[in-house]
Image (cartoon, helix red, strand yellow):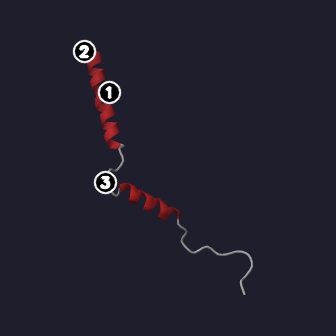
């Protein structure tokens, strides 16, 4: 019986450590900062070239 209690205790400690290490940021601006970082990663470095006919 003590073995099962020890195994259960170790499992609870392990799950708690995993949950605490992998939780996301929770600040007021965390989602805004995440969106800005993703948008910046997808943004092109230079303005796109236009294809097709030239105006004029």
**Which of the two labelled residues, at mark 2 and mark 1, occupies the earlier sequence position?**
2
For mark 2, what is the residue?
2
**Mark 3 residue crowding within 10 angstroms, few (<14) / some (14–19) / many (20+):** few
Task: For marks 2 and 3, give the one nearer the viewer.
Answer: 3
Percent across and percent down for residue 47 are: 58, 75
Q: Residue at x 29, y 16 (%)?
A: 4
Q: Mark 1 or mark 3, which has the lower sequence index?
A: 1
Please tell me which residue lies in front, 28 or 15. 28
Residue 34 in the image: above or below residue 43: above
Q: Give yes or no for contact between labels 2 and 3 (Cβ–Cβ under 8 Å).
A: no
Q: Does dot 2 land on a helix, a strand or a loop?
A: helix
Q: Quadrant of the C terminus?
A: bottom right
Instruction: Compare residues 26 and 2 and report the one nearer the observer.
Output: 26
Q: Position of residue 10 (x, y in %)?
A: 29, 27
Under tag 3, what secondary structure?
loop
| Left-right relation of 22 to 2 | right
Q: Nearer the viewer, residue 4 or 22?
A: 22
Identity of the residue drawn at 36% across and 47% down? 24
Q: Position of residue 43 (x, y in %)?
A: 53, 66
Are dots 2 and 1 in contact, CB under 8 Å? no
> Regarding mark 1 in the picture, which secondary structure is present there?
helix
Closer to the observer: label 1 or label 3? 3
Residue at left 31%, top 54%? 27
State the residue in front, 46 or 6: 46
Q: Give the spatial CA distance, label 1 vs label 3.
A: 29 Å
- Give me the disc on residue 11: 1
Marks 2 and 3, how far apart at CA: 42 Å
Residue position for label 3:
27
N-terminal-most mark, 2 or 3: 2
């Amino acid at each position: 019986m003590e073995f099962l209690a020890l195994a259960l205790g170790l499992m609870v400690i392990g799950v708690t450590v995993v949950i605490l290490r992998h939780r996301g940021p929770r600040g007021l601006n965390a989602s805004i900062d995440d969106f800005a970082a993703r948008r910046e990663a997808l943004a092109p470095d230079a303005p796109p070239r236009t294809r097709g006919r030239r105006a004029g």
